[in-house]
Amino acid sequence: MYFYKLKDKILFSLLKYEDLTEIYENEAKESKDSIYYLNKLNPLKSRKKFCIYDSYLIFIKEEGINLIHKKENFDHEIPGWILSKIKDRKIIGINTNYPNWKSILDYKHPTKWKVNIVGLGDVGSTLLIGLRLLGGDCIDNIGLYGLNKNSLQRLEYEVNQIIDPFNNQNYPYVNILEEKDIFNCDMFIFCASKSVPSINEKIKDVRMIQFEENSKIVSYYAKKAREYDFKGVFAVVSDPVDPLCKVAFISSNKNENDNIDFNGLAPEQIRGYGLGVMNARAIYYSKQNPKTYHYLKDGRAFGPHGKDLIIADSIKNYNEDLSIYLTEKTVNANIDVRNTGFKPYIAPALSSGSLSIIATLKGNWHYSSTYMGEVFMGAKNRLLPSGTEIEMLNLPKPLLEKLQSTYDKLNCIDCSKF
């Protein structure tokens, strides 16, 4: 291993960097702070920054489903003090094939977050209420931006008047934004949407109907994020969540000649919030069948907020039939709500939106979509000061094959034309 010092930070790598100041391992060992691991990966297929939460990640050659599935019989000798830092989540991985990778050394993780929301329709306004009620200990301020000025003014009036007067609880202040201020925040939440099918339209996968129109909107804001050199989290709540995340990544990283230069949003800055409600729906249906009641404790949700979702009834004792049953019930849950004559937005706005976003800000485990190689794919994860940690599991072969199939299908969606 090689050890370096840059901007008073300790770095190490298996690679030789001629332009960095090399130091001895003993000096590196003395650091009580987080240190940085440098690697070179294809930037189109890998993250710029990530948490090293398993020693396997030091030797990784590419990213994909291997970020979820734990590598067996992995045998590499690593110094004990580095293993200790891995255990404490104090090693930050950096892909130095990104042109501006050194900026990561200057990043400071927020202690209390400033959050801005674009799109205050049914989902956005419900999500806002959830953040106001539950986010007081991690959110400092919530900014609102949308096209309907009367709706924004109404929300500013009413949401700021949601107060329990005698419990000393902090509530994030809500204010209206000008467009030039939407990226003056730590997290930008994209809830804008167009072409939502009416409840009278009989459509199997409602989410993908919105793809083209919502891609144009998210692309616009992703390019704005590049323009403002946004360093925070770009959160996508609108459907279809996972492909829209990829559109945001590609659009943000195109220059004026429409060529990808990787000077826009880093992939790990973009997170999709759609899987939380799929897990919640799986829990709802699991409680209706004694054979699946164990899902709450042992089950997991993977994949997109849509038809290629995977619900695993248990990661300890995986049952294919029960998993298929829960997956089908969960995927069709939105149709069940639409059949009542209403659009299904309350549970998504709160389970995928408010609750999952608050868990993200607090560094807690939750469901969201993060970048895995070439696609954004949902899994249990948490956002730490050192980066994203994705839950690594010993997956049974049938489940692993399903995950790979879903991954391949997501990778086939063309997100480059917007």
Image (cartoon, rainbow, N blue to C red):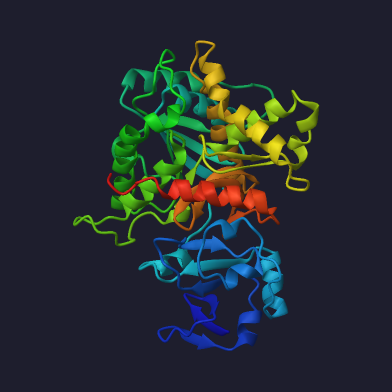
Give the residue furthest to the right. Answer: 290
* Pick the front one: 198 or 308: 308
Above/below status of 115 relative to 403: above
96 vs 33, left or right, is left
Whole-percent x, y for residue 28 in the image:
61, 81
* Pick the front one: 64 or 357: 64
Residue 400 in view, yes or no: yes
211 vs 270, left or right, is left
218 vs 306, left or right, is left
Q: Residue at x 69, y 80 (%)?
A: 79
Residue 33 in view, yes or no: no
Whole-percent x, y for residue 128 in the image:
50, 28
Q: Which quadrant of the figure contains the N terminus?
A: bottom right
Above/below status of 363 relative to 179: below
Q: Residue at x 52, y 82 (%)?
A: 4
Whole-percent x, y for residue 165 in the image:
64, 21
Q: Residue at x 70, y 73 (%)?
A: 83
Which picture quadrant has residue 199? top left
Which picture quadrant has residue 40? bottom left
* Pick the front one: 348 or 265: 348
